[in-house]
Image (cartoon, rainbow, N blue to C red):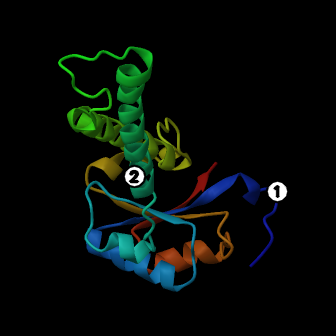
Amino acid sequence: MSAPSAAESSIYGVLAEFATPEALRDAVEKTTKAGYTKTDAFSPFPIHGMEEAIGFNERKVAPIILAGGIFGALGGFGMQYWMQVIDFPMNIGGRPLYSWVSWIPPTFEMTILFGSFAAVFGMFALNSLPRPYHPVFNHPRFLRASQDAFFLVIEATDPKFDSIQTPKFLSGLGAMDVVQVED
């Protein structure tokens, strides 16, 4: 592995185009086995087995949704408690001020509301969205990534990245086209 020179510092990575989704998945598996860790695959549709091939097994959105749901439930319950017991207590028909059974539907609704907002905003944050620019957009053939093309990129920040060996490695995997992507 060579140290990045001044010319390599503006390189985002190496982009390879593959003909079929199976070829892309096989290339991703071989890239992961070769020790590359900073990779990404682009496809116009989900490819079965791609998550395992690329090594993606993190589930970060679920705890965010759980936290949002708990916050919503506590907030909804606390809001009703504050309004009906502390702020403006009304004893109508002799019912107790702390009538928690009647608070279950609004508490449930607040749980769902806050959990769904947490899911949407958590997904946006974890996916770095909105992302109006990405270096792979500079490659003219990448416009077909949402139609019928399959791409694999190895980032230059990968510890195993080499500006000469990495393109050769991707060409050896059966890539139709391999190009360096500028940052």
**Mark 2 and mark 1: Cα distance apart in space:** 46 Å
Q: Which residue is mark 2?
A: 66
Residue 141, visible in the rendered structure: no
Q: Residue at x 67, y 55 (%)?
A: 11
Q: Position of residue 168 (x, y in %)?
A: 56, 77
Residue type beneath disc 2: Leu
Q: Residue at x 57, y 67 (%)?
A: 38
Q: Is residue 169 above or below residue 153?
A: below
- Crowding near pointer 1: few (<14 within 10 Å), some, many (20+)? few
Q: Residue at x 74, y 59 (%)?
A: 8
Q: Which residue is mark 1?
A: 6
Q: Nearer the viewer, mark 2 or mark 1?
A: 2
In-front residue for pair 169/58: 58
Instruction: Specify whether 170 is left or right of 76.
Output: right
- Crowding near pointer 2: few (<14 within 10 Å), some, many (20+)? some
Instruction: Specify whether 25 is left or right of 95.
Output: right
First-in-chain label (2 vs 1): 1
In-front residue for pair 152/55: 55
Query: Decide: marks 2, 1 in contact (CB < 8 A)?
Result: no
In-front residue for pair 157/81: 81
Q: Position of residue 3 (x, y in %)?
A: 81, 70
Q: Residue furthest left?
A: 93
Q: Position of residue 131 (x, y in %)?
A: 49, 39
Looking at the rendered structure, the secondary structure element under dot 1 is loop
Looking at the rendered structure, the secondary structure element under dot 2 is helix
Instruction: Specify whether 172 is left or right of 65.
Output: right
Q: Position of residue 146 (x, y in %)?
A: 30, 48
In-front residue for pair 39/97: 97
